[in-house]
Image: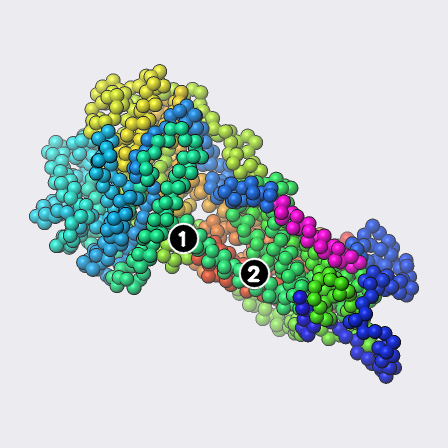
Amino acid sequence: MHESDDFVDNGEVTAPPNSQEDEKKEVDDTDAAPDVEKAVLPYDAIQNSKRDDVAETTGENSFKKSCWSDSRGNLKVVNLVVRNPCKIFWLIIVIVMALTFMLNVLVFRKAEDGNPFTLPTNEFDLVDERSIQYDSLRLASDQVKGARNAAGMKGKTTLKQSQLEAIQYWVFEASTPSGLFGDEQSIQGMKDAYDIFLNDAGYKDYCLYNYPRNLALVTENTTVECTPPLTPLLMYYASYWNPEVVDEVIGELKDPAKVEVLNRVGVCANPLAFCPPQVAETFTPQEQLYAIQLGMKVLNMTSSWDMKGDLVDNITQATELASYLVLVDAYAGAVDFGFDQTFSVENPASQYSRGILFWGGPYNNRNTSGLSEEQAKEANKADDEKLKKYILDNYLEKMDEQSDPETHASLNSYYFMTAIIGDVILDIVTQDGLLALFSFAFVFCWIRLNTGSWFLAFVGFFEIFFSIPVAWFLFTVVFQIKYFSTLNTLALFIVAAIGADDIFIFMDAYKQSQYHLDILTDLETRMSWVYRRTGTAMAITSATTCAAFLCTLITPLSSIQSFGIFAACVILIDYVLVMTLFCTAVVIFHDRFESRAKCGCCCPCGVQNPSVTENAKAAIEANDGDEMKRDRVSEFFRTKVSSFVQKPLARLVLAVVFLSWVSVSIWQATKIEPTKENEQFLDENHPLQKSISILDKEFPTANDDLGMKVYFAWGLGLVDRSGVNRLLDPENFGVPTFESNFDFNEQCQVELLSFSDKLKTDNKYRGLIKRKNGVGQVYSFIEELAAFNVYGNLNNCTEVKKGDWRSADWQIDTSDLPEMMPKFLKEKTCFADDGETVGSRYSKELGWDGNTLKYAAVSAESDKLDPFGQDSEFLTRKEYDQFILLAEEAEELVSVQCSGSVIMTDLDEKFVFMNNQSIYVQTAIQSAILGVCIAFVVLLISTRVFHIALFASLSIMCVLISVVGTMVMLGWYLGSIESILIGIIAGFSVDYVVHLAHAYEIASGDTYERITEAFGDLGISVFNGMITSVVASIPLFFCQLQFFAKFGTFLCLTIAFSWVFANFGFMSLLAQLKIPLNEKGKLCRL
C-alpha cells in the first residue's frame, strides 16, 4: 500500500530552516544521528519521551483530572488510541467481522429460502376497519382450509395440463392511423406472434388442455386440444366465415331499438339459463323470442371462430361486426377483450390490441393424496422450472425478435409472461445494482481524493459498508425486531452519503489542527482536540438524523417503522465506527504513512520520527507564529465565500432569489395531489412497463377480464389482535373468530340465494359489478349446493344453470352437511370452463372445516378494480364507498335470517392499500413537521442559542418546501414512493446546516469572525459531503426500477437544496441580523 506524499491537502507541513544556525544545527544533527528513515525507535519509547517533555514544560497539573480526561486535559480514550493504535484498530476490525459472522449464522442461515427480508404483503394499519375485516376473512379462510385438509379432504387427482400454470400476454400498438385491424399487414404481424407457439410441435406438451366437461369420458386415447388463445384473431382467422350471415347480424344491430331490446332481455335470451322473474317482467314474449333467435344465429357464427382458417376475405366487414357486437351485453364477450376502449361503430379503428395464451400443468396426472403441503409445493415448483426452461430455450429469442420495433413497420409488439417475469425483474434489478456500484465507487474515489490516502479510503469505505451488518445485528439480534423491510436497502445509500460526510468532517478537523500551535504539543493533545471538535458536531447531526428517521414510528405501517428504526441504527453505528475505527486509522496514518510512501499497516516498519505533528509545530514556530497557508479549497470558503455572505448587496440578492424561489415552491407544493393512476413499477419506456401501462389504460373491462372479488360473509367475528406486534413477529396478524350464533338455516339459505340473484341481474349494479354476457359475475356456492341437494350431482350443468331445481324442495338440512360436503367439494363446478372443482371455485366463500359450516360468503367481481397492480386511492375509494352501501343492503336482506353481521372485504389488499395511501400522505406531513421540530429542539439544547436553532430549522423547512415543489414541477404525484421520501426529508437535510450552526456557535469573535471561522473550518467538509452525495445519486437516475430512480432524484434534490440553504440562506441570515452571543458556559447564550 503506497501513500501519496505530494497531495496538496495531505496535512503535511515541513519545517524550513530559518537561520544559518538552524542550518548548521541541522547538518550537525545529520552527522550525529542516523537517517530517520533507517533508524526507527520503538513507538512507546518515543511517546513516553514526548509526554515527559510536555510534563516538564507545562506541568503535571495544568488541568484538573476527571474520569474522562487526564491532568493535561486530554481525553483518556484518545490517549489509549494514540498509544495503542494497531491493537485497537485490529480489535475493532475483529469485533465488526465477528458481529457480521454472527448475523450470518443467526439471521441469514435461518431465513426461509435464504431471504432475510419480510415479504411486502399484508402491509396495513392493524386497527383500521379495512384491515380488520380483511384479516377476519383471510385468517378464518386459512384456518378452515387447514382444518379441512387435516380432515383428509384435500386429496384429488389432477389431470395432465388441466390447471392454469401461466399466461402469456401479447400487447400490440398500432403505428398507423388506420389501427391494428385496418390492413392485412398489421393483422398478419399480430398472427406471427401467436404462431411462434401454435406452429411449434412441442407447444401441445405445455399448453392448457381444453378437457370435455364430463371427465369420466377421458381415457388415455382421448384426443385433447390446447385451449385456443384469447384474441380477436380468432374471428379474423375463423375456420368458417359466411359473409351473408354476418351482414344480417350487422343489419339487425344497426337498429338502436333492437339493441335496447336485446340488452333488456339480457340473460333471458339464453334458453339454457335461469331467467329471474323480476327480469322477465321487463319484456314481452315476442321480444324474448326475437332475442333468442338472434342469439342462436350469433352463437352459430362465433362457434367457428377458432384461428384455424385463413384470413377472412373482407377484414372491414369483420371489424364492423365486432363494433356492433360490443353494443349488446350478451354478445360483447365474443369480441370486447381484444379491442381498445375507443373502439366503436363511429371509430372502428383500434390502436391497441391484446391477447393471451394459456399454459397448463401439471405435466403428468397427479394425485395429491398423501402429499404434504411441502411436497405439493415442491412438485409445483418443479413444474414451474420445467415450463420456464422450455420457454427460455425455445421461444424467448423468437419473442424478442417479434417485439423488436424493426420487425413490423405498422405495429409495435410487447409481451410479458408470468413464468419468466421473475427472471426479467431479476435482470432489471441486476442492471440497477450495477448502476448503484458506480455510486459507491465514486464515494470511495472521492474519499481517496480528499484524504490523500489509499489506507484511509479503504478504512473509510469499510466502516461505511460494515455499518449495515453491524446495525442489522443490533436491529435483529439485540432489539429482536424480526420485520426487515425491503425499504431498509435504502439505508445503504443513506449511510454512504452521511458516512462520507462524517469522514470529511473528521479528516478536515485533523488537517486544520496542524495550524493551531497550542494543540501541537503532541499527538494526544492534537487528537483530543480533533475528537472533541468533531465528536460533538457529529453527535449533534447524528442524533438529529436518527431522531428524524425515528419519526417514522408515528406511522402504523410496519415496513416504514422498520425502515426508520434500521436507518437510525445505521446512522448510530456509522457514528461509532467513525469515532473509533476511523479515528484509530487516522492515528496510524499519522504515525506511518502521512509524509512518506510506506508499505503495510502494522508491519515492523515503525513510526516516523520526528512525527508529522512535530514538523507542523516546527513549521509554525519557524514562521514566527504567522498563520500558515491552508489548502486552496479551504481558503476559498474562508475568504471568498465568507466575504460574499458578509456583503450587504450580496445578501440582498440572495434574499430576493431565495424568497422568490420559496414562494414559487410553496405555490407548487400546494398543488401536489394524490396519484389517480396505477403507480408505475418501471421506467415508462421499458417494454414491460409499456405493456402494463397499455393494459391498464387503453382497454375497457372486458367479459374475460378478471375482476377483483369483493366478499360478503356471514358467521365471522372480528379478528382478535391481542398481543400483535408485527415488528417483533411479522407472521402474527391475530386469531380469527367466529360468531357462535351463526345459523345456516333454510331461511338463511333462501336469503343468500336471493341476494346472489340480485347481484347478478339488478341493473342498478351495472358499472359496479362486472358482467359477463349480460350477467353479473357472482360466486355463490348456495346455488350449486342447492342443485346438488336436488340432483345428487352436478353432471347436468344445463339443469343447474336453468334453475329447474328451484321449483323443488332444495333447502339443505344442516345435519346432512357432514355427509354431503366431501362429495360436493370434489364435484366439477358448472360455472367454469376449465374443469375447476367446487372446492376450488368457492375456497374462500365456503367456510366448511370438515365438520361444521363456520361461515358462508357470497362474492362479486368489481367492474372497475382488478386483482393486479396497485390502483389509485381516488379510484379505489370511489368503488369502496359503493360496496359499503351494498353491504348495508346485504345486512338488511340476509343478516336477520343468518343471525350474524356481514363482513365486506376483498382479499387482494386493494381496500387496505387504499387506506395505506391515505396513511402515506398523513405520515409524510407528520414526519416532515416532527422532523423539523426535533431538529429545532436538538439544536436548541446543544447550542443553547434560540436564534441559531430557529434559523437552522427555517433552513430545513425551506429544503422541505423546495423538494416538494420541485416534485410537482417534475410532474410527480403523491404516491407511496413520494410520500415515503417526503417523510424522511428532515432526516436527510439536517446535516449541513447543523454542522455550520455548531461551527458558528463554538467560534469566537463577532458575527463576521464567527462566519469566517465556520466557513474556514467546515466549508470544505460540507462541500465534499454535498459533492459525494449529489454525484453518487446521478447513476440512480438511470435505474429502471422507479423506486430507485425517484430516490436518486430525491437524494440529489435534497442534498443540493440543503447545501445551498445552509451556506447561503442560514449563514446570510446570521450575517444580516448580527445577533450577539454571550460567553460560553451560560445556560442561555442569546
Q: What residue is pinned by disc 2?
A: 440
485 displayed left or right of 852: right
Are the residues tagged 1 and 2 within 8 Å (C-beta)? no
Report if residue 97 lies within the magenta region: yes
| Sequence-wise first label, 1 or 2 | 1
Q: Work out which quarter of the rendered image holds the N terminus and state it.
A: bottom right
Helix, strand or loop for disc 1: helix
Q: Which segment is the magenta one?
A: 81-103
* Viewer-side residue, 255 vs 806: 806
867 displayed left or right of 282: right
Q: What residue is pinned by disc 1?
A: 424
Residue projecting furthest to the front: 221
Q: Position of residue 896 (x, y in %)?
A: 37, 22
Q: Residues within 10 Å of mark 2 (few under 14, many from 20)?
A: many
Q: Position of residue 1057 (x, y in %)?
A: 56, 62
Tell me which secondary structure the magenta stretch mostly adopts: helix
Give the amino acid at mark 1: Val
Q: Position of residue 442 (x, y in %)?
A: 57, 64
25 displayed left or right of 853: right
Give the amino acid at mark 2: Phe
Which residue sits at x=28%, y=47%?
A: 202
* Viewer-side residue, 1049 vs 7: 7
Which residue sits at x=29%, y=50%?
A: 699
Q: Position of residue 75 (x, y in %)?
A: 80, 56
Q: Residues within 10 Å of mark 1 (few under 14, many from 20)?
A: some
Above or below residue 80? Residue 5 is: below
Mark carried by residue 576: none
Residue projecting furthest to the bottom: 20
Residue 430 visible (yes or no): yes
